[in-house]
Amino acid sequence: MRRRNVFLALLLAAVVAGCTQDNSDTQQSARDNVKDEQARINEGVGAIHDAQQIPTFDYSQEYQTLLDVLSVRAEGTHGTAVVTALDGSLIWWCPTVGAPVPSTYQVTGSTQYVDVAGDGTEERLPFDQAEPTGAYVGESAATWVLCLDDNGTPFAMYDEAQVRWTSGVVEGLPVDKRARVDEITFEFTTAEDGG
């Protein structure tokens, strides 16, 4: 009886070892198949990249436009803001100095760029990145516009309607829709003042 139990135990151990070896072989075979398939994909993509290389350019108008718009935002220029309702009808307009500014732009960020001490990594957590103009961008449906009165003195207008802005003077807008103030109560600094 003992002999039979020992025999059965040895037989069971051999079967388990064989199954384990078969399972290990199956897993290795699957890994090899994945590696082979990935190698074929990489070879195909490499051939396409060799035949059709990504072009490079000595000049990009798209990039230059972004740089110019950034300069206008940072340095200011005279322009015209037109504020419209959802149906496109004109609410008000004004000549401006500088581009309109979303109401949630900030001059300081609320998040820091930090490395967590003692975590065993040098991973740095993300932080709010300031625009090159110095502002931190937020999400907003409202806009600040620095309008000019008839004498060229700036005053601020805030609106939650759609604001369109042109870097130039727009003629033919209705005089009765021009934003006006009776008295300017704050003196805004502009680039022309040495801001």
Image: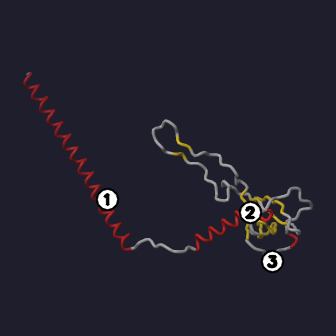
Q: Residue 100 carries which label?
A: 2
Q: Viewer-proximal residue, 65 or 12?
A: 65
Q: How crowded is mark 3: few (under 14 residues within 10 Å), some or many (20 or more)?
A: few
Q: Which colour scheme is used?
A: secondary structure
Q: In this view, does 127 lie above or below 19?
A: below
Q: Which residue lies furthest to the bottom in this view?
A: 172
Mark 2 or mark 3: name the one nearer the start of the chain.
Answer: 2
Q: Residues within 10 Å of mark 2 (few under 14, many from 20)?
A: many
Residue at the spot of label 3: 171
Q: Name the residue under label 1.
A: 38
Q: Where is residue 92 drawn, in percent x and y?
A: 82, 67
Say what secondary structure mark 1 lies in.
helix
* Disc 3 from disc 1: Cα separation: 62 Å
Residue 6 point in image, percent of width and height: 10, 26
Q: Of helix, strand and loop, which one carries label 3?
A: loop
Q: Where is residue 28 in the image (x, y as percent from the top left)?
A: 24, 48
Query: Given contact means CB atoms under 8 Å apart, are the residues at marks 2 and 3 in contact?
Result: no
Quarter containing the C terminus: bottom right
Q: In this view, does 124 lie to the left or right of 31?
A: right
Judged by depth in the image, the label closer to the viewer, 1 or 2, is 2
**Residue 84 appears left or right of 16:** right
Horizontal side of 156 relative to 103 (left or right) equals: right
Q: Which amino acid does label 1 sit on?
A: Gln
Q: How crowded is mark 1: few (under 14 residues within 10 Å), some or many (20 or more)?
A: few
Q: Nearer the viewer, residue 116 or 43?
A: 116
Residue shown at the point (29%, 55%) measured from the top left: 35
Q: Are marks 1 and 2 in contact (CB under 8 Å)?
A: no
